């Protein structure tokens, strides 16, 4: 029995290592296929509904993908010119913001400089290391996801990959199910079902939450008159898949820009109130109703997964962070439950006790 367990442990450990090595070596060319797989996973339930109503799967896939990409392209056509205009204007205003910010913090920097005169500056080298680490992540994101070749492959290859993956999704799932070890097929199917429930609940629910918040922040910041309010609002909403992070970043950026733009306090208060209202609505209305509390993905775990997989595998790692976090979370809970039912936890005598 122990020999069998050891063989299984080595087999699955080797598979995980091979998967990580595959992502590391081929991460730069996997972007269109990863995005295509995400699109296929997201749209498969809709295609299944159409198929149940008598529409052939190929026709349903073609129609749904055309509609999906038409909505995406239309949204980009409507939003990109506005965002591009605001981004260019923001770059023009950036020196002014830097000068105002420097003027605001200069007295505090002077106080810190006086207090740090006697401090060995070499001990503060960790700050430079942190900046270097952050720069490395940005460099990986750029080289892995925003290079011209990857952008072109995303535009031309991803729709084709999404079509074939979505068309053959049920066949792929059936083949994978046929490869499962027969002795543990029921257990594995149960865990895969939990992973699917966790992932689908998170992705589809959080997508709607981010969309609502991006629209809310962008609209009200523009109405208040905040410069670049649409850009700040959409950015804050889109990064709200990690709870509190989007509202916190938007609050800091929005109120800072409002303080530099307005001479009166009322617009500053309104900008701050916009983000506080959005965060309250997310916590007590949007997330409970659209996401629910059954997904089992803690915000801190999601943030760690994004940083860790992004640092390891670049932009592809960022895209895979949430699915892999869901897989690891479900398998970790399964392993803990098995441990709590095992003699290692209960002890060897009569199912109880605390024998070491």
Image (cartoon, grey):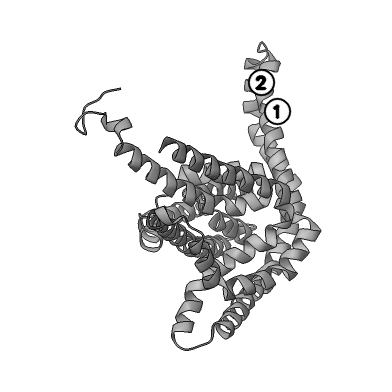
Task: Report the label total.
Answer: 2
Q: Residue furthest top?
A: 118
Q: Judge the density around disc 2: few (<14), some (14-19), many (≥20) Cα neighbours within 10 Å.
A: few
Q: Judge the density around disc 1: few (<14), some (14-19), many (≥20) Cα neighbours within 10 Å.
A: few
Per the model, the C-alpha gap separating discs 2 and 1 is 8 Å
Q: Residue at x 60, y 45 (%)?
A: 309
Q: Residue furthest left?
A: 350
Query: For numbered disc 1, what is the local secondary structure?
Result: helix
Residue placed under numbered mark 1 in the picture: 128
User: Is residue 354 shown above or below 101?
Assistant: above
Q: Residue furthest right?
A: 148
Q: Residue at x 65, y 42 (%)?
A: 312
Could one spot residue 127 in this view of the protein? yes
Q: Is residue 338 left or right of residue 208?
A: left
Q: Which mark is residue 107?
A: none
Residue placed under numbered mark 2 in the picture: 124
Query: For numbered disc 2, what is the local secondary structure?
Result: helix
Q: Quadrant of residue 81?
A: bottom right
* Quadrant including the N terminus: top left
Q: Position of residue 226 (x, y in %)?
A: 60, 57
User: Is residue 214 shown above or below 142?
Assistant: below
* Quadrant including the C terminus: top left
- Relative depth, front residue between 301 and 25: 25
Could one spot residue 269 in this view of the protein? no
- The answer to whether mark 2 and mark 1 are in CB contact below 8 A is yes
Q: Is residue 83 left or right of residue 170?
A: right
């Amino acid at each position: 029995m122990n020999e069998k367990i050891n063989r299984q442990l080595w087999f699955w450990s080797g598979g995980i290592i091979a998967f990580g090595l595959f992502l590391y070596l081929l991460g730069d060319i996997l972007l269109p296929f990863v995005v295509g797989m995400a699109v296929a996973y997201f749209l498969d339930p809709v295609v299944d509904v159409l198929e149940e109503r008598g529409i052939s799967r190929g026709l349903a896939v073609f129609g749904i993908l055309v509609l999906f990409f038409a909505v995406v392209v239309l949204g980009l056509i409507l939003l990109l010119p506005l965002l591009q205009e605001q981004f260019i204007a923001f770059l023009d205003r950036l020196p002014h913001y830097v000068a105002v910010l420097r003027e605001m913090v200069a007295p505090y920097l002077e106080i810190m400089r006086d207090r740090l005169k006697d401090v060995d500056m070499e001990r503060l080298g960790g700050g430079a290391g942190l900046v270097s680490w952050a720069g490395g992540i940005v460099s990986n994101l750029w080289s892995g996801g925003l290079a011209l070749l990857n952008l072109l492959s995303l535009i031309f290859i991803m729709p084709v990959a999404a079509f074939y993956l979505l068309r053959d999704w049920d066949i792929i799932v059936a083949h994978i199910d046929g490869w499962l070890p027969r002795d543990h097929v029921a257990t594995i199917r149960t865990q895969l079902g939990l992973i699917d429930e966790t992932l689908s609940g998170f992705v589809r629910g959080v997508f709607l939450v981010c969309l609502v918040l991006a629209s809310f922040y962008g609209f009200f910041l523009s109405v208040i008159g905040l410069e670049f309010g649409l850009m700040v609002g959409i950015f804050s909403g889109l990064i709200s898949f990690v709870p509190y992070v989007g509202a916190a970043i938007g609050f800091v950026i929005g109120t800072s820009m409002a303080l530099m733009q307005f001479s009166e306090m009322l617009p500053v208060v309104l900008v701050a109130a916009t983000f506080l209202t959005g965060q309250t609505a997310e916590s007590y209305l949007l997330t409970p109703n659209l996401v629910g509390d059954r997904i089992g993905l803690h915000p801190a775990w999601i943030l760690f997964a994004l940083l860790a997989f992004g640092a390891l595998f670049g932009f592809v790692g960022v895209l895979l962070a949430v699915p892999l976090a869901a897989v690891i979370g479900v398998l970790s809970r399964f392993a803990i439950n098995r441990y709590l039912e095992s003699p290692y936890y209960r002890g060897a005598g009569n199912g109880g006790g605390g024998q070491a």
